[in-house]
Amino acid sequence: MKSTHNSLLYLAMATLMTGPAAAADLINFWNNPQKGGNSFNGAPPDQAYFNALAETGATWVRLTFSKWEGEGRDFLVGDADHYDGLKTADLAVLRKTLDAAQTAGLKVAIVPLVLPGARWTQQNQGKFDDRLWTDPAFANQAVRFWRDLAAALKDHPAVAAYNLINEPAPEKNTDLPETASMHDLEAWQKEQAGGPHDLLTLYERMIEAIRAVDKLTPIMVDSGFHAGSRSLAAWPRTLDDDKLLYAFHMYEPYEATSSPNMRREKPLRYPGTTTDYADGTWIWNRKGVAKYVDLAFDWAKKHEIKPNRVVVGEFGCMRRWTDCGPYLVDVIDAIDARGGHWAFYAFREDIWDGMDYELPFSLKPGRFYQFTEQGKSEELPRNGVLMQLLKTRMRR
């Protein structure tokens, strides 16, 4: 008995001396191509939601919390007009949600839609909030927010990335058009160096703040102009961190993949739609999609960044668009050919069905809202061929 008692005492003392296990270095998660989906729901997803996503073959989820109801006007932030610390009850809800993702075996990239001075347009009376790009006080608050959030979540095993800003657009409300030539995009980036519109400088400040409290969690940075590939290709330099992921989104040609196209008398088709940029007309077909995706990967290669550090954080098209299937195939093939990561938009969004690929083409949008309002969401048919397509690609 004495020997057993001494052994237990020694084990207890050793545990106290060593302390809690060190957080995992999840940059290794991104060494191989990861495929997943976006969760942009209006309410925190439950365990069944994450289980269902994992069953598709997804390995990660890009999760936003900014649509959820919280203590203040803006979930977790409290008030985007004046940030004064994380909201405790909101943080508890986020932790519980992350626990559910972890239980399902999914890794999570956390992405806010709202930051101090940058309230999401759909929560801001439809107006683009550019205070983050014009008032240094809000940049300071946004940096502080990320330091606080990293300190709170650094040891959570599900968190595989902090995605700092969703689709930043410091170029918006300036004299630079989104269809500008690559030369003009590059020139604009250089002109903004060190100023309030300099996305790279803001990212550097956020990264420094995060690394002061969390040395290990990977950081994901979206490119400018709503995370466009052309914008990333115009960046004059990389960021100095060895656990960094560079992200862009793929909805081009937006005129064809988005909801306004569905309201046209004759919707634009794929392949065949064209986009006029200042340096030429872009023809959207399989080759054109690959060309757009390649811009980001070629920029990464030029700067000696491995393709497994490039992420297509969102891509998709309206589920009832006739050409959505061929478009998704071409986008995925282009990304897979370069060895990057991807996450489709979106999985079982609870307030919008436009890009819910589990729903069949035959289910009209009005029916989705009827099921939802009647509390019968679980009865929605989920046999859509587009999700079967995605499942096949995720399980490769």
Image: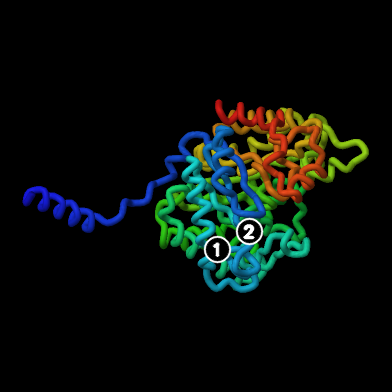
Q: Which residue is mark 2?
A: 68
Name the amino acid type tagged 1.
Asp
Above or below 73: residue 342: above
**Does the residue at mark 2 contact the one at mark 1 (Cβ under 8 Å)?**
yes
Secondary structure at numbered mark 2: loop
Name the amino acid type tagged 2.
Trp
Query: What color scheme is it?
Result: rainbow
Q: Residue at coordinates 75% horizontally, 45% vertically from top-left?
A: 371
Q: Decide: few, some or many residues near mark 1? Use Cα within 10 Å; few <14, some 14-19, many ≥20.
A: many
- First in sequence: mark 2 vs mark 1: 2
Instruction: Indicate the position of residue 64 as horizontal and vertical percent values.
Output: 60, 53
Instruction: Indicate the position of residue 214 as horizontal and vertical percent values.
Output: 41, 57
| Relative side of 20 to 360, left or right | left
Above or below 137: residue 232: above
Above or below 112: residue 160: above
Q: Is residue 148 visible?
A: yes
> From this viewpoint, which residue is outermost toward the right?
265
Q: CA distance from mark 2 to mark 1?
A: 9 Å
Q: Residue at coordinates 85% horizontally, 36% vertically from top-left?
A: 268
Q: Which residue is mark 1?
A: 90
Q: Residue at coordinates 59% horizontally, 43% vertically from top-left?
A: 49
Q: Residue at coordinates 84% horizontally, 41% vertically from top-left?
A: 261
Say which of 28 and 173 sits in front. Answer: 28
| Relative side of 196 to 251, left or right | left
Instruction: Indicate the position of residue 60 as horizontal and vertical percent values.
Output: 53, 41
Quarter of the picture containing the C terminus is top right
Q: Decide: few, some or many residues near mark 2? Use Cα within 10 Å; few <14, some 14-19, many ≥20.
A: some
Q: Which mark is residue 33?
A: none
Say which of 253 and 200 sits in front. Answer: 253
Secondary structure at numbered mark 1: helix
